Amino acid sequence: MVGVSMSQERRPQGRTMVHTRTFSDYLALLHRRRTIILAVGASLLVASVALAFLLPAVYRSTATILIEEQEIPPDLVRSAIATYVDQRIETIKQQVLSRSTLWRIVEQYDLYKKLRKRSPTEEVLNRFTKDIQIDVMNVKVIDRRTQNPTQATIAFTLAYDGETPEQAQKVAHELTSLFLGENLKTRERRAHETTAFLKRESENLARHILELQEKISNVKQRAEGALPELVTLNMQLMNQAQRELIDADRDIRSLRERKTYLEGELATLKPHTPIISTSGERLLDTEERLKSLRTQYASTSAYLLPDHPDIVKLKQEIASLEKETGGTDDRDELSKRLLAERAALADLRERANDSHPDVIRTQEVVTSLERELQAMTLRPAVPPSIKPENPAYINIQSQLASTTASLDSLESARADLKRRMAEYAKRLESTPTIEPEYLDLMRDRENSVHKHQEITSRLMEAQVSAELEVQRKGERFSLINPPELPEQPDRPNRLAILLLGAFLAVGGGIGAGVAVDNVDRTIHTPEQFGRALQGVPLAVIPYLPSEHELASLGRRRAVVGFAGLGVVLLGVVVLHLAWKPLDVLWYTILRKLG
């Protein structure tokens, strides 16, 4: 404080003098502007204290969810979920944080009472969404396929900022349950959707393959062997038939020549030349022997019983010869024998009664002949065949018959070969018209079968993957840290606000004082006076305050002292409430000091 105190402002004339402020100048400035500095600093400090204690406390409850890999190695069972973990987390977040789900939670736990009264639903839901925090934890790993370093998501945290600890814990627990449940449902739904899609595709391909097979079958039926893959076979068969036809023509010419020769030889022979044995007797043929045996049987059966060995033997020989000759029409002979037996029966009845054994046996023979004649009458008459007796004639005739049969067979085979050659030629001509459609159908069928096999293989993998998700063996979210009841509010950080407010109060007060001093043009120091006069004062007379000014200064100092004491007490209270209790702080200081 100096004695020279001039209240009017003096602007220097001419050249301005440059003066650098010293530390004492700043101390004088602080002392001179202490009132404005204290006023601004106190205002900022009070505002920061009010802000620190008036802001509502926000409690955060956090849950940590670990992302566990599937238990079965992916090389053995591949999961149907192909998206990355962070993408699935974001998808589940959008599903869980839907409008209906959020509003249900708001109503269930009665959140944001005041905000719901004065704000629309959309603003309440936006506030709720902002209070939900999801942070993903990534680590650096080596990719198994590319062997390159990459980021892998191993866990994420889910937090909710509530007005009370209990509310924050309940809502965080509800959101965690929704996330875990939605992950399970999403994985199962995607696995089942994948299986259903592949099953529908497999069924559609199977139906398409059946339709193609029906079309191919129709084309084959319409082609009648004129298929492209049978061209080589048809060519080979036609060439083979042509060679067989040439051989058949050669054989037919040879057989025709032989037939002509045999017919000429047969014409020179007589068919009915009798056969004479070496003893000079005539040999009987089969039919003549059959007639002789029948005559012998008729004469022998007149005096022998039917079960006599000779009768049985004759019957067997007659039956054997009848099989060889095919049976002959002997009704005349049977009629003659029947008349003879009837005459003999009439003669015996004249000489003996009916109970005589000869009469009974003759009656049985007559009855047997009548039955045989009746049976022969029912059979169609067989014209008598006259067989040749000349062995040479018979030999040539048999050779001629064999040659004729072979010739007929070869001619039939030749006609069949010509028909086959025409059919093969027709197939070869029809192949180019059927080939495009047939090849298109075959390519379509081959591609469809290949795709069906691929889809079927994927369907089996998808079914195994779906079973993997149903049995909870795939990748899953595991809750390792459930939401806990928060003991301290997460925000606001009252101590930080108070410290920041204190720094702002000091800085703001000093800044206000410096600003006011720079604006004020009043002269307070000899230096200012010298700069104003552009000279050096001869002497400085100190300011002598009056008694009234001294009393006023004492009162101001007392007020400042009490204000400083109040600020200290207020700081202690704030420290006790906002950061750490004083007793705990005291014991902590003592422990640090040993």
Image (cartoon, rainbow, N blue to C red):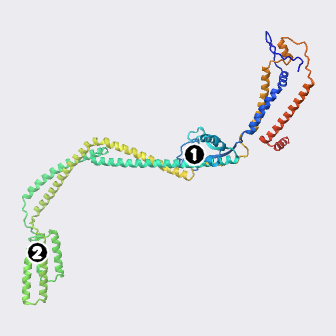
Helix, strand or loop at mark 1: helix
Write down the residue under mark 2.
Answer: 292
| On screen, residue 346 above or below 12 | below
Helix, strand or loop at mark 2: helix
Mark 1: amino acid: Ser
Residue placed at 10% from the left, 54% from the top? Answer: 261
The label nearer to you, 2 versus 1, is 1
Residue placed at 41% from the left, 48% from the top? Answer: 204
Tell me the quadrant of the picture where the C terminus can be found: top right
Classify residue 561 by image quadrant: top right
Locate residue 463, reporting x and y percent.
50, 51
The CA span between labels 2 and 1 is 120 Å
Residue placed at 35% from the left, 48% from the top? Answer: 213
Mark 2 or mark 1: whose residue is earlier in sequence? 1
User: Foreground residue, 11 or 347?
Assistant: 11
Q: Can you name the residue that lies furthest to the right here?
A: 547
User: Foreground residue, 489 or 566?
Assistant: 566
Residue placed at 16% from the left, 74% from the top? Answer: 317
Write down the residue under mark 1.
Answer: 100
Q: Which class describes the residues within 10 Å of circle 2: few (<14), some (14-19), or many (20+)?
A: some
Is there any visible trace of residue 135 in the rendered image?
no
Can you tell which mark lies on residue 39?
A: none
